[in-house]
Amino acid sequence: MRKNSPSTARRQALRQLPSVDRLLAAPAVQSLDLSLSHDIQVDLARGVLDSARSSIRAGEAVPTLEALARHLQRAAVNEFLPSLRSVINATGVILHTNLGRAPLSRAAIQAMASVSAGYTNLEFDLDAGTRGSRYAHLVASLTDLTGAEDALAVNNNAAAIFLVLSALAVGKEVIISRGEAVEIGGGFRIPDVLRQSGARLVEVGTTNRTYVEDYLRAITPTTAAILRVHTSNFRVVGFTHEPELGSLVAQARQRDVPVLYDLGSGSLLDTAAYGLHREPTVQETVAAGCAVVSFSGDKLLGGPQGGLIVGRSDRIAVLKQHPLARALRLDKTTIAGLEATLTHYRKQEALTHLPVWQMIAADTKRLKRRARAWQRTLAAAHATSLTATVVSGVSAIGGGALPGETLPTWVLRLTSTAHSPDWLADHLRSGSPPIVARIEDDAAILDPRTVLPEQDKAVAHALTTLAT
Ligand SMILES: *Cc1c(COP(=O)(O)O)cnc(C)c1O
């Protein structure tokens, strides 16, 4: 047998690795204070030694005890890293569905934490000392803000539509414009939901033009409702017509047919005041006479996930009594978060207190200053391989709200002579907290609009790590 063959050297190197017990007893490990049970420490140590063995077999040197201790510490941190984590959204897409849509206001966060910590009057009437209703908590805020007679909140807007159709249209016909029989996203298609709820879909008009008469002609004795759907994730432009809501409602009412409206985002504020396309507000839709209107809690409303339903009290009463309402009901933390969010609107402070609206209304000069500050931190880090420039760009609303609508912004544009834009984005995403950037024109782009101001330091720090 040849002495000092590579395999012999490797076998000798492998033998230099400590045993699990020796590794755990080493001073470098003892000083870590892993605060984990012995069994878990043994598992993690085995994993660390296994990967050390693989790297030695791949020709690497034997790691020191200190290096193994560092690997063990990292393994301990990673082992219990939650799957759902905070990330920094530098994409410039405000209602990013993949990143959890609306960030919440301080008051909403506080309200959710406060009701989580102990018991609440969730289904308890404090005045009478008797059983109360979980559905009662959001009614006053929602009716006050929208002008509707009654309200009900469920898990999300998809659930709201399902409940509305199941309760009000099962076994009957629902008339919908061809241009509005849409897929909302994630495979949620209005025709499928209608079918699932037991209602029969009657499509009228054409993709681009539908008139009041089209709806009226389709009314039969088995018509349960007319459904309008806000086509929130695309826009048909050009030769189009959709009937004016007020006149549709008025003429349908003469035939005793209620109009239901899935508003999608459902803004309570006038989006046109912020340089955006005009969305019908919830208040206007209620005022036009719709029997039931539903919208999301976590889109332009700026609260936690929820499906808010407002409308006529006779219809809402039917919804509350339907078995699905129980299956789709909200938990106490969401009710608390939604109520705190709605309170901002009632106090007329939504624009200054709700992150979604602060981002929409953000001053472009201030955005430019923040992007410049990131750029300066990078310049101070002497990252010679990196080029960072502050250039004008566009932010998006996202979340299927205001399709194609953008807001002018200033972004940090990053390129590197050493790495691809994808590498830069991957590196930022693997940090703690992860930062999600976007790739555009062969560069990694970071938009300050969707970065919370208190996250600016973390972004600046992460940028300096790209230099090494
Ligand atoms: C987003 C959207 C929905 C779904 O709302 P979720 O709260 O995400 O369930 C339904 N309808 C329209 C028109 C939408 O834009």
Image (cartoon, helix red, strand yellow):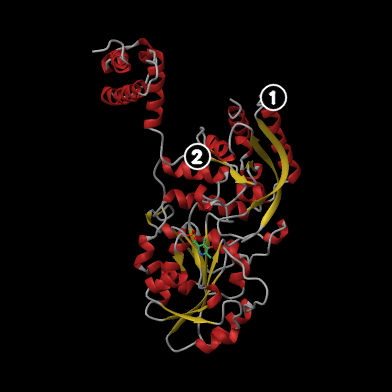
Residue at 41% x, 67% y is 320
Dividing the picture into quarters, in which one does residue 321 lie? Answer: bottom left
Label 1 belongs to which residue? 380
* Residue 150 visible in the displayed image: no
- Mark 2 secondary-structure assignment: loop
Judge by depth and name the residue closer to the eye, 173 or 294: 173
Q: Depth check: 436 or 346 in front? A: 436
Q: Identify which amino acid the numbered label 1 is placed on.
A: Ala
- The image quadrant where one finds the C terminus is top right
Left or right of residue 268, residue 432 in this image? left
- The residue sitting at 48% across, 53% down in the picture is 305
Q: Is residue 193 above or below residue 253?
A: above
Farthest residue to the left: give it.
1
Q: Residues within 10 Å of mark 1 (few under 14, many from 20)?
A: few
Q: Quadrant of the N terminus?
A: top left
Mark 2 or mark 1, which has the lower sequence index?
2
